[in-house]
Amino acid sequence: MSEPVPFQPVLRRLSDAVINRIAAGEVIERPAAALKELVENALDAQARRIRVAIVNGGADRIVVTDDGVGMTPDELALAVQRHCTSKLSDETLVRIATLGFRGEALPSVGAAARLTITSRKADSDCAWRIHVAGGEISPPEPCSGEKGTSILVEDMFFATPARRKFLKSARVEGSHAEAAVRRLALTAPDVAFFMEVDGRTILDRPAETLEARAAALLGIEDADGLLKLDGVRGDMKLSGFACSPSVHRPTTAGQFMLVNGRAVVDPLLRTSIRVAYRRVIESGRHPVAVINLSLPYEQVDVNVHPAKTELRFADEAGVRSLVIGTITRALGLGAGTAGVRPGFSAPRPARIVYPPAAPRSEGFAEPFLALGAQPAARTFAPEQPVSDRPAMMSEGREAGNQFPDPPLRPDDPPAYSVSPVAGPEKDHPLGAAVAQVLSTYIIAVTADDNMVLVDQHAAHERLTHEVLREQFLSGTIRAQRLLVPDVVELSRSQADLLVSRADALSKLGIDLEPFGAGAVLVRSLPALLGNASAVNLLRDLAEELDADDLASIEETPTLDAKLDAVIARMACHGSIRAGRSLTIPEMNALLRRMEETPRAGTCSHGRPTWVRLTRNDLELLFRRR
């Protein structure tokens, strides 16, 4: 019996229809991607008003109407053919100033769906319409229509049923489409945007400033509360707005990134935002920000992916440094001075459980001494008999609290009093203290008659944290020699990477040296980390540095988080406890220090330290509005 003849593949050219459908799969991965391309075309056509409507998540119907320059019949015929564009002034692909330039969007949509384009130029007697269905193009025909262009997309992926089968629910696809339009609305705040989903209006914004558009799309009531970003590094400039750390989201949906006016989803920029917020935001939550990076066109490559949302920067380290530095400076303000005020309702229940208070170790400063007060000015006196104090001041004390209560003086009102005190000054954003509730929360009134609530322990914890961290950053962190040096086995590249960073690691208390191929010998670790495992620490450090070669040693999550966690624990134990009664002068001293200390809006665990209640908040609370 003869053996079967093996299959012999024959090289052949694919048909134009199959080529177009393959290309469409790269550009149009879901209805939101098609919608993004259509809106970008409208913006490139100098539209001042853009109207969007989708049905069934965009799978059944997408309509994008603009009042741009429009197209002639000849331009319509070219627009639906691959690699035809009016947006490239030359063929170098260096200075790309438009959102689109590849000439793939409309042909890809026409290859996967039923596409109808109606367009009219301002000086034309009538509009012209062209139809494309599954790649089959009909000739343009005259019709009625207003100036601009209207694009109708129906039966998305009818020509590629396999792709349509993998679409998500209408709700999920609709949310992706809405997110795409919101990102594009930020790129052009001077353009009016209207969006309708299944007959419901979900976006209706007039032409406005970037600040107003950002506040609206981020869900911020008061645009004046946004932190303004303004940074320059060489030819690069960063602008935009950021929310205070007390405003955060469960996902990165609240982060909008623009590069030269182009909405992108870039991992380098997203990582830079995360690093800038890492010490002031609650673990597992994501900051809210709009960043707009401007740099010379030749320093960024947008021709990386057909969707044009991924970029390559010529100076990645410079971009990273600019973003982190600018946001860090914006966040380095005292409590109450700027930024979106914390809301009345917490975004989610706090999961931090404070450890029981421990006796102060010898040499540890009194709480207000850690804030920089002079010893002669200390206000805490030795313990007094309980019978000498009002009953309310002794209630609510934490078990094991070692801090003494303040003395009572005739000229000091009791902590629970609401007696008149010195009026708040305008340069004191947190106002003047008037009372203490539950021996834990300070009530203050501002010059504009707003009420401020302060968690005294959380607030003082941040103040102590900043003092301790400054002490550590001012010099080399003390190292602790290991009795028996540890040998850490790594890949050769990771071992070489750690050895190349040996000088930077030594400043943080990690002393290591090469130990053959693919291993390092660790002789010391930071004393702050106690009995930490050198093997686990070095392996994590190596993996993080290998994955992000732009990160500095101080920015690696493993080491930074461990050191910061120790400082946070020290700050927590060394701060005023909940249940500690304070006098009015002590409360005011705490408020003033909060206003002066960077990042005092959140505690060491990222939770808000203060809440402002306006007249409107109180009227809503009591249903007076």
Image (spheres, rainbow, N blue to C red):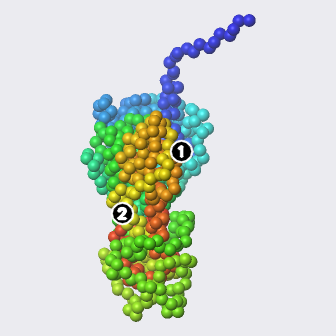
Q: Where does residue 257 sit, x and y in percent of width and height?
A: 40, 49
Depth check, front residue: 98 or 421: 421
Classify the position of the N terminus by image quarter.
top right
Q: Judging from the image, what secondary structure is the residue with disc 1 in? A: helix
Which image quadrant is residue 89 in? Answer: top left
Q: Where does residue 325 sit, x and y in percent of width and height?
A: 33, 54
Depth check, front residue: 468 or 119: 468
Q: Are marks 1 and 2 in contact (CB under 8 Å)?
A: no
Mark 1 neighbour class, 10 Å CA radius: few under 14, some 14 to 19, many 20 or more: many
* Residue 191 visible somewhere in the drawing: no
Figure check: 603 above or below 71: below
Q: Which mark is residue 294?
A: none
Depth check, front residue: 620 or 259: 259
Taking the image as shown, residue 555 lies to the left or right of residue 53, namely left
Q: Residue at x 44, y 80 (%)?
A: 443
Q: Where does residue 269 sit, x and y in percent of width and height?
A: 40, 48
Q: Residue at x 49, y 51 (%)?
A: 483
Taking the image as shown, residue 5 lies to the left or right of residue 552, namely right
Identify residue type, mark 1: Gly
For this orientation, the residue located farthest to the front is 483
* Residue 499 visible somewhere in the drawing: yes
Q: Where does residue 394 sit, x and y in percent of width and height?
A: 53, 85
Figure check: 141 above or below 498: above
Real-space Cα separation, disc 1 to disc 2, in angstroms:
56 Å
What residue is disc 2 on? Answer: 471
Q: Residue at x 39, y 49 (%)?
A: 505
Which image quadrant is residue 290 in? Answer: bottom left
What residue is disc 1 on? Answer: 58
